[in-house]
Each structure stands twice: as C-alpha cells, then as structure tokens.
Image: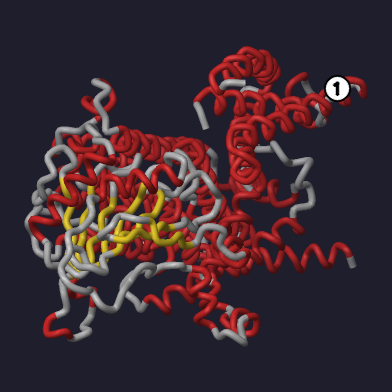
C-alpha cells in the first residue's frame, strides 16, 4: 500500500460515509437544524454517491493488493474513516458536509497521481 | 416472541461479555501490540539501533554470516542463518553442535545463537537480554506464570465467549444502521452504549475475523476430534505433516568430509526461482560433509497465507535437489490463510497500522462494554446509593476489576518498557526481571483498585498510566542515542524506533485527555446539589 493509495482510499471512504450520513434523518437534522429533513431526491443522490464511494474504496484497495488482501485493507480503511466520521458528526456536524465534499474533490487529483505513480 | 428473543439475546450478550471481558482486554491489548512485535523488540534492544539504520544487501549479509559460522561452528551438525528483513536489520546465526558420543540427546540443549552486526559481521555481544515483543506475543495466548496448556484453554474459552457475545450483540443491536454514526457524549449510560456500538460496528468485520481466526489457531486444543475423524485413515500425524512441511533435506548419515559449496550462488538461484523475492532463512545440514544439504525459505511475501515454500540444494555440488511446499494441499492453504489472517504477517506497514487501529478499537469496545455494565447497574441502585447505602458486592467487584484492568494495563505495559531501559544490562535473568516488572506494576494497580474502587482511583491510575506512557520517549532520549531528536528530526532512523516513541506518546496523550474529561465532570457534579443528582439519575432512567 502506498501513501497516495492509502490517502485516496481514506478520502473516498470519508466522503462515502459522509454522503450516507447526509441521507439519514438524525444526521441531516444535526447539520441543518432541528426538524430539517432531506428531500427525497437529495436522499437518493446521497445514497448513490455514498455507495459509489464505498465501492471505489474497495476498487482502490483491490487494485493495490489483489483480491484477498485488498478486501481486508479496504475494510480497515472503512473502519478508520467511519471512526473519523463519527467524531466529525459529533463535534463539528455543521462543517462535515464541507469537509466531505472537499474530500471527494481531492479524490480526483489523488487518483490521477496514484495511477501515474503505480503505472497504469 | 420477537421481543422475548431479543431480550434473551441481550441477556446472553451481557453475561457472556462480562464474564470474560477482563481476560479479553489483556488478550486484545497484548495481541494489538504483537502486530509490531519485531519493532518492539528492536526498540527494546537499543544496541542494535545503529545497525538497523544502515542495512546491508542480502549477499553481503550472507557472506558475513557464513564467515562467522566457519570460524566459530565449523564442526556443527546444522547451521541456521536468518537474513535481515525490512523490519529488523540484524543477522541472526545459530547452530546445533554434534551430539557427543553419537548419542541422540536433546537438540535444543546443544543449540546456540548469536546476533551479528550487519555492518562488521562481528558478534553483537553488547545487545541486552530481553524478550521484547515476543513476551507480549506469548502473553497474548500463553498468558504467564501458568502451564501453557491451561493458558490456551482459558484463552480459547474466552475467545468462544467473545464469538457468542459478538453474534448475540449483533442480534440485540436493534438500530444497527440507524445508529451507525451516532455518538452522543456527556449523557452517561447512553454515551457508553454509543461508544460501545460505534467501536463494535465500525470494525465489526475485523472483530469477527480476529475472533474466528484466533479460535482456529487454537483449534487443535478445542476440537481435536474434528481432525481425528477427517484423518482417521492416515492418522493425526499426516495432518501435521501436511500443514508443516519442515525438516526437509535432513539425512541420517553425514558422510565423509567434503567442501561446502559457496552459498552465494545457491542463494542467487533461489532468488531467481522466486522472481527476486527476498530470502528469509537458510539452513545448512551437515556442513563440511558429503551429504550436506542447504534448505532456503523465502521471506513471507504479500500472500494471505502463512505457509511459505522451501528449496533444497545439495550442499557439495550446489545443485537444486527438490522444492517443498510449493502448491501445498487445500487443507494447508485454508489453515495457512486463516492463521495468516490472524497474524497479519502478509501485511505491509500500512495494513499493519490499520490492524493496529482496529485492535485498539477492540480494546475500547471491550472496555466500554465492561463500563456499561457498571454504569447500568449503578443506575439501578441509584435510589439506594443516594440514600447513603453502599454499592452491592457485585458492583463493587466489577468497579474494582474495571479499574485494575482498564486503567492498570497501560501502567503494566509502560512499566515493562521502563524496566527495559532501567534494569541494569548485566543482571542475570534480566528478561524475567522485565516481565516481573510488568506483573508487579499490574498487581499493584489491581490491589489498589480492590482496596478503593472510586472515581479518584480511576483518575489516579489513568494519570499514572498517561504519565508513564508519555515519559517513554523522554526516557529513551535520556538512555539511548536513538531518541526522537535523532530518529525523527534529523531523519536518521531507524524508523521503527521513531514510530514506537510516537505511538506510546499518542496513547499517553489519549489517556491524559480521558483524565481531563473526568476532572471536568467531577467539577461539574460538585456544583450540582445532591437532590439534583437524584433527579438527574431518575431522568436518565426514564429516558
């Protein structure tokens, strides 16, 4: 596992968990104030993006380390990103969507650098 | 019926967890540390630090090892050479002397080993005696001060209870998806439950995997009849022969004297066969005789399985004679993969760090579960407690064990590392002395906790643990030349030593933060009059 690959998997996992949390009533209300509920369209979009993020984490991990170890590594990254997400939602809920969005944006350049580094 | 089932599962979860949680805490903590056992051993032998930061190539290391063995053990029955790895730079050589008068005595008593400085090829006589990370690794499943068989039974049974607790916990957890990210701090019982759930659910794949594979590695002890029935025809020994293909290339007769073929080209041949993989160990049987053979194993590469193939060469001609364990049987692969998954030998530094963090989350899960029982039970007794009654015996016992294990273990671990630097280097029985320090510190913490299981004791022991852990990098700076100032800020390594210092520092800081939270809470509660406390307790009870 390289530093770039690890960072890429981590931002994808953090962003993915963040999107999934945004689609949940409690965390949406934590972010946007009491009683707020996500629109059905937003909820669907966030669920889709979140799932995509999680799948991409496994994609990155498996490409780096193969089917056996990659899956183990992907689960490990997801666990750490999950803990970070829990802490974000608890202590800085209003800022979480911003961080998650930029984590998702950062994934693109990281992915390019990672692909160059590991030789496509 | 549905509700009843869930409730009975909750009961099972509570009691299966509580019964074994203190042993599990030790097993989790020692096991988590064992992911870095080689790094810990390196940290605990500061005499080897200089060699570790200037690694030499395998060819050079091999030449030096052979030269040393030819000088000191030319007449030995068998040589063992362990080449430097990415994780430890030292060369280890060992040999078994010829049995005297042809008697087939105990080979272990004739075995000698030495560590060589890779830079000079000379014996590292100055390296201090320590069991290092190996002690923590053994503690993880052999415990200490008791027969190994008993210890493994105890650990196996605890692991079995852990598996029961995991499964019943999943069933009991009604809101596994709704509460996926939920943590509500400062709310007493609710916060502990959230912390327990979060650390359990987020690392659930890890917890299931580590408990299950841990059971499998101990399965020879728990379910021998499974193996006996599956291997009835060939007998149990064939299973072991299939799983551990060792002892290859051994010959009963050594034959007449003959010159040993140069090992360099043989090693190159093996390297080429394995596509340039680094070599791990080289065993030479009967060096200097006609029937000499050379057995070479590869370093554990990035495959899940623990098993690695070996190549056997003729020790006189240098020709390859056979390969063992390449394309191992399905039984061996399955067991090897489960075993390897548990030991994480396949993992590189990144993945090992992930495992380490998941292990820490396991420690937090076990600790928060144990605390949760105490918090819940205290709430049940809230009214009696407010009227000045004493805690029930069970609650007092659990409180005391919680302090002694959860706050006491960091003290014990830190004491082990402190002892490594402070116990005189030339003391006889030095490794045992370090281990005694571990248990003496832990016993002191446990006894104090039994005498006074109070909030003050929590704060005291957690503060001591935090101070001792944070003091380790300082101690390392005062007693060695490879402190953080050199390893990190001058960038000279060895990196494992820097990593160790930083990790214990961070763990100490984490404990210090817990202490700060406890102090703040104490201050807050001091302001609330006792009547309010009862009302608050009642409120949380109804909520």
Tag 1 residue: A45
Q: Position of residue B490 (x, y in %)?
A: 24, 20
In this view, the residue in front, B456 or B335, is B335
Q: In the rendered image, which quarter is residue B48 located in?
A: top left
Q: Position of residue A6 (x, y in %)?
A: 55, 28
On screen, residue B357 above or below B239: above
Q: Is B58 on the left-hand or right-hand side of A68? A: left
Give the farthest residue toward the right.
A40
Q: Position of residue B45 (x, y in %)?
A: 20, 47
Estimate how packed mark 1 is, as few (under 14), some (14 to 19) or many (20 or more) residues with alpha carbons within 10 Å.
Answer: some
Q: Is residue B408 something that shows in the picture?
A: no
Q: Is residue B176 something that shows in the picture?
A: yes
Q: Is B254 on the left-hand or right-hand side of B496? A: left
Instruction: Kindly identify the residue that appears in the image at 74 percent across and 32 percent down.
Output: A55
Instruction: Kindly identify the residue that appears in the image at 28 percent across and 52 percent down.
Output: B82
In this view, the residue in front, B216 or B205, is B216
Q: Is A3 on the left-hand or right-hand side of B34? A: right
């Amino acid at each position: 596992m390289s530093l770039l690959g690890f960072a890429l998997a981590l931002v994808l996992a953090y962003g993915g968990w963040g999107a999934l949390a945004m689609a949940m009533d409690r965390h949406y209300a934590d972010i946007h104030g009491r009683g707020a509920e996500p629109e059905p369209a937003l909820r669907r979009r966030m669920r889709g993006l979140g799932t995509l993020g999680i799948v991409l984490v496994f994609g990155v991990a498996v490409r780096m380390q193969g089917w056996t170890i990659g899956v183990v590594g992907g689960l490990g990254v997801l666990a750490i990103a999950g803990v970070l997400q829990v802490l974000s939602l608890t202590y800085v809920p209003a800022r979480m969507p911003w961080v998650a969005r930029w984590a998702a944006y950062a994934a693109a350049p990281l992915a390019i650098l990672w692909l160059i580094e590991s030789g496509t | 019926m549905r509700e009843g089932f869930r409730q009975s599962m909750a009961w099972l979860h509570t009691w299966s967890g509580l019964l074994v949680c203190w042993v599990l805490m030790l097993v989790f903590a020692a096991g988590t540390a064992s992911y870095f056992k080689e790094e810990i051993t390196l940290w605990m032998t500061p005499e080897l630090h200089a060699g570790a930061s200037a690694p030499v190539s395998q060819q050079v290391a091999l030449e030096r090892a052979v030269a040393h063995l030819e000088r000191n053990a030319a007449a030995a029955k068998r040589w063992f050479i362990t080449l430097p790895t990415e994780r430890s730079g030292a060369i280890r050589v060992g040999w078994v002397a010829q049995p005297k008068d042809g008697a087939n005595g105990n080979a272990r008593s004739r075995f000698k080993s030495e560590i060589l400085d890779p830079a000079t090829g000379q014996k590292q006589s100055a390296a201090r005696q320590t069991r290092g990370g190996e002690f923590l690794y053994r503690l993880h499943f052999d415990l200490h001060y008791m027969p190994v068989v008993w210890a493994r039974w105890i650990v196996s049974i605890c692991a079995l209870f852990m598996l029961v607790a995991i499964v019943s916990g999943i069933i009991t957890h009604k809101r596994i998806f709704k509460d996926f990210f939920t943590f509500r701090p400062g709310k007493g019982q609710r916060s502990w439950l959230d912390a327990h759930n979060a650390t359990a659910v987020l690392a659930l794949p890890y917890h299931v995997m580590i408990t299950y594979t841990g059971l499998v590695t101990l399965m020879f002890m728990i379910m021998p009849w499974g193996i006996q029935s599956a291997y009835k025809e060939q007998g149990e020994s064939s299973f072991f022969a299939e799983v551990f293909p060792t002892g290859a290339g051994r010959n009963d007769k050594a034959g007449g004297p003959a010159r040993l073929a140069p090992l360099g080209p043989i090693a190159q041949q093996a390297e080429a066969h394995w596509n340039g993989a680094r070599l791990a160990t080289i065993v030479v049987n009967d060096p200097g005789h006609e029937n000499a053979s050379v057995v070479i194993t590869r370093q554990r590469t990035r495959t899940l399985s623990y098993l690695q193939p070996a190549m056997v060469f003729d020790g006189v001609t240098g020709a390859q004679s056979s390969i063992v364990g390449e394309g191992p049987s399905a039984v061996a692969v399955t067991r090897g993969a489960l075993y390897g998954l548990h030991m994480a030998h396949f993992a590189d530094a990144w993945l090992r760090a992930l495992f380490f963090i998941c292990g820490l989350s396991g420690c937090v899960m076990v600790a928060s579960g144990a605390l949760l029982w105490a918090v819940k039970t205290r709430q049940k007794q809230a009214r009696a407690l407010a009227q000045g009654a004493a805690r029930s015996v069970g609650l007092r016992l659990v409180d005391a064990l919680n302090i002694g294990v959860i706050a006491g273990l960091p003290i014990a671990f830190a004491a082990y590392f402190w002892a490594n630097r402070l116990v005189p280097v030339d003391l006889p029985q030095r490794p045992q002395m370090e281990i005694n320090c571990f248990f003496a510190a832990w016993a002191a913490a446990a006894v104090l906790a039994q005498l006074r299981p109070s909030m003050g004791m929590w704060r005291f022991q957690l503060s001591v643990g935090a101070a001792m852990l944070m003091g380790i990098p300082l101690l390392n700076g005062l007693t060695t030349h490879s402190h953080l100032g050199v390893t990190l800020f001058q960038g000279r390594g060895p990196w494992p030593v820097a990593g160790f210092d930083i990790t214990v520092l961070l763990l100490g800081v984490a404990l210090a933060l817990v202490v700060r939270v406890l102090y703040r809470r104490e201050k807050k509660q001091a302001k609330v009059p006792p009547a309010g406390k009862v009302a608050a307790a009642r409120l949380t009870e109804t909520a």
